[in-house]
Amino acid sequence: MSTGEPEEPNKPAVMLVESDAMFRATFEHASVGIAHVGPQGQWLNVNRRVSEIVGYPRDELLKITFQDITHPDDLNLDVGLLNEVLEGRRETYRIEKRYYHKSGRIVWVLLSVSCIRNPDGTVAYFISILQDITEKKRISRALTDSETRFRIVQETNPDGFMILRSQRAVSGEIEDFVWEFVNPAAEQLTARSANVLIGKRLSKVMPEAFARGLFNVFCNTVETGTPWRRELYYPDNGVPRWFRFTVARVGDGFAVSFQDVTARKQAELQLHASQQRQRTILDGIVSMIGLTTPSGILLEINEASLRLTGAASQDLVGKPIWQHPAWSHTRAMQDRLISAFAKAEAGRRMRFDAEIRDSRGLLIPVDVQLAPIFDESGQVTDIVMSAVDISERKRAEAHREMLLSELNHRVKNSLATIQAIAAHTLREATDFEGFRQSFTGRLRAIAASHDLLVSTTQDSSDISRLIRDQVLGYAPADGTRLEMTGPPLVLGPQGSHAFGLILHELATNASKYGAFSNDSGRLSISWFIEETEDDPDVIIDWVETDGPPVVPPSRKGFGSVLIEQSLSHALGGKSNLTFDPKGLKAQFRFPARR
């Protein structure tokens, strides 16, 4: 038994153990797959990462060869290179290949193979390093596919497309752009080939981009990332052309897509000009005109309609036409319009008279027409609605009705009037010849009054002449019984016509019942001008005295209606009749220049 120092361990043996442990730890925990493969392809040893890459546990891998899980398309290449190593023609090789994962999916690896030889030069085994590049392959393939699709799209894209990168000064400021990509459409639109543009500076090839301010637009897009879209007038060698530009940042540069829209722009300008002409025509028409849907929703309306109703276009468009202020004054009017539109929607043209309400609240008679617009299949697409002011026509119709009533009234009273004139003339006549002349003159005056009654126009007349023509035929021969006083005054055509009818009515009434129906009655007619802020007014007084006692009528007769309507409707004037027992008094006021 030894009593000296304890024996020291065998240092080389310890170091060998430690080195082997370090190797095994490195082998097992390496981030890449490491495998020892026999000359026939059998797996001799694999680390954890190999199992992770191919999905097979270690014990399963050691029972198969690498050929068993290699993709058929890569097997010949791998085996061929392996044989070259076995034959001594190479020591290593490096390839990208595919394995079948145990789950069935394909795994791409970067395989590096080197060999360990026996002393006699034969291969003892292979050392294989496997790096999983599946994701890298996926990204690369996606990038390739994307680039392929991009080029295919750009080769068939009808829009011009170019990519330019920024060229910056030492300060970092963009001083120019350089072409990197040009598609065929851009070559055609710019009349420059890609070979001429790619690698060239924008300032050298297209200096007009700087002159037109596009360079600043491109710089702003690159610096801010804000896309820019605009249609620009861009003359090319004097030829007017319109382009639609879209600019977007790409890296430290920009992509620009552009399309020649000259044909569309010219069509739009022509359409706009046509619409403006149509709008000018519509707004120049005094009638109300609107365009509606078949169901009566207002789409457009002309200026005359807006002026008449005092409404704004935005308050009317998009709403049913029967809600228009002009048509909504009564439920009956709305119902009539709704019914008419239902028939127009079925394809019928509609026409009827109605009354609309203007901005002052007054009712105006109109001639309404609904005209359907049909498409190629015969379906109603729109309805044109017009409303023409027929106030003049209505007034003319009312005037004709009044004239017909007046004529009927006159015919019934003709014999009575002539008999009264004959009786008065006979009392005043001293011989037959005097009676004949006086009676004939009065008949001619009555005939003149009838001519005035049925005429539709009348020249301007001096008021004293008008009174003589209408009254003298009914007055007694004694000139003292008729008095006329007033300044020289010429009435306009409407005033002559309307007041002539009134004089005729008053004169016939005086001859039958008033101052001219007895031997003592007198008539005084006077007139004068009263100045007003607008046109001067004529004021005429008719005063009868010493005739038979006047009895107020129990009802308003046709004569009274004629006097009121002639003055108010035709002249905008006023009349005042006073049935004084001592004699009829009347005063008339109307504009002098009518």
Image: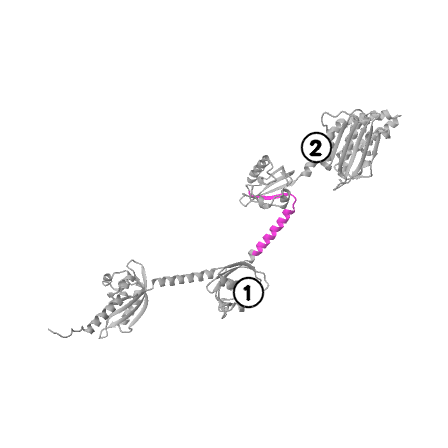
Which residue is labeled 2 in the image? 401
Give the class, few, some or many, for how many residues have Cα within 10 Å of label 2's Cα (few <14, many ≥20).
few
SS majority, magenta: helix
Quadrant location of the C terminus? top right
Amino acid type, label 1: Ala
Q: Are marks 2 and 1 in contact (CB under 8 Å)?
A: no
Q: Is residue 455 above or below residue 412?
A: below
Residue 516 lies in quadrant: top right
Q: Quadrant of residue 427?
A: top right
* Quadrant in the picture for residue 308: top right
Residue 319 coordinates in the image, percent (x, y): 56, 42
Above or below: residue 89 compared with residue 587: below
Q: Indicate whether residue 285 is drawn in magenta.
A: yes
How far apart are the alpha carbons under marks 2 and 1? 78 Å
The magenta segment: 265-293
- Report helix, strand or loop for mark 1: helix
Is disc 2 placed on a helix, strand or loop?
Answer: helix
